[in-house]
Image: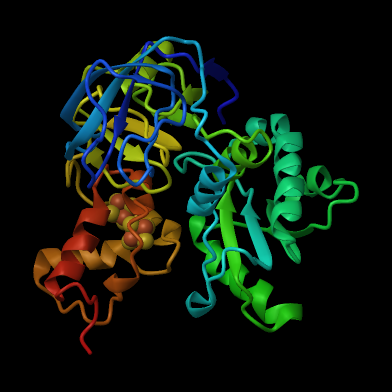
Amino acid sequence: MITVQKNYVQPRRVMLAVPDRKPTLAVGQHVRIGTPLDAHGEHYATVSGTILQMLNHADETGRVLPHVLIDNDTKNTVEPSVSDMHITTRIERYFKPVRPLEQINYARLDTLIVDLVFFDEPFITVDKALLDTHHESILEALRALHKHYGLERCVLLIKEDEAALWESHGTLPVETVRVKPEKGVNFRHRIINEIFNGALKTRAPYNYLSLESMLKLREIVVHKRPSVINRVVVQGEAIKNPSVLFVRTGTLFGDILRIVGGYDTQKAITIHKNMRLQNRVLRNESFGIGHDFAGIYIQEHREREVYECIACGRCNLKCPVGILPSKIMHAVKHGIALDRMRTDLCIECGLCSFYCPSKINVMEYVKEGRALLGGKGRVT
Ligand code: SF4
Ligand code: SF4
């Protein structure tokens, strides 16, 4: 478990993606925190300073997008035009009711579900130390959201052994649901169904938020300023000092890497962004940390097959959706019919590959199996 927490909230420069939209600013122009970078105001400056470059630049997966590079003057001046309306718009980017779609009404949200369940490696989720240190901030954000939306229900998903921390929340009308996430991330659908099929019996408009989103909302709702700080977890076998960092959105990954002491290997490495172990090869280190960037797991690159399968069954035991990755791999290799193996259920969590003692990238075989069935995963 990671306990090192570091702050790096005044980077020299930030690199901000403006995907799908043409940046509206020019090189040399001065910006403040909150200055819109595109005509729709969806992307905004996270530091005050001067625009150094407008460029097409690769993100962490090598995808080239329009970007703006800003030189930070460290003065933190905020755009005066960040009005209440702008702030409300930004809240609603996080705060989108999930269901029922036909009843979306931002002005009225009945239920808020906040996911505070953390997992150990390899998943990158809530760190326990962070939960302890940010307990009050989360409650503060909940109080503000209660007031803003007049929420009827607020449900915190917590781990069983965390109950004491969250059940002493004073007068705040929140419920807690204790979760036993034995098999990983796949518990969420079940819990949401239980919440709505229980006392309520209806699917009121609800929103599902992570800890990161809660902390961002706190910045917006409580402090009435655009959200500019990301909590980023950097961990994995190829990192010297795994850490949790608070950084300005747009901070260059190369700067973060220097702070955590660099790589612990000279070999090719693979990155996994956020929750899923998607096995992507790191293309560059000069990408900027985006608003949705919560964590990165870096390991030595794993080829599809390194050693032979020893039939230990670990991949099957770890699969959270209950399919049999080793059996699927065998079927793919030997041309055996796959139609009953439910490759369509795979959520590409990567756990099968992560836990394989023979370092086989089992997930790639499962993906191939699904592709062989035209993406459906079963014959209908
Ligand atoms: S990647 Fe797919 S097959 Fe492998 S453990 Fe995750 S859900 Fe199961
Ligand atoms: S974990 Fe690896 S070695 Fe074990 S059964 Fe699965 S593929 Fe084979």
Where is 87 relative to 111, above or below? Answer: above
User: Which quadrant is home to the C terminus?
Assistant: bottom left
Note whether residue 108 is visible.
yes
* Point 85% across, 46% down: residue: 169
**Left or right of 298 on screen, residue 129:** right
Report which quarter residue 286 is drawn in: top left
Q: Which of 98 and 166 lies nearest the eye of the viewer?
A: 98
As drawn, the residue found furthest toward the front would be 81
Where is 379 relative to 341, above or below? Answer: below
Q: Which of 103 and 28 lies nearest the eye of the viewer?
A: 28
Where is 51 relative to 44, above or below? Answer: above
Q: Quadrant of ligand 1?
A: bottom left
**Left or right of 248 on screen, residue 169:** right
Q: Which of 128 and 245 lies nearest the eye of the viewer?
A: 245
The image shows residue 325 at horizontal and vertical percentages of: 30, 62
The image shows residue 346 at horizontal and vertical percentages of: 33, 65
**Left or right of 37 on screen, residue 32:** right
**Left or right of 301 on screen, residue 312:** right
* Point 90% across, 51% down: residue: 171
Report which quarter residue 51 is drawn in: top left
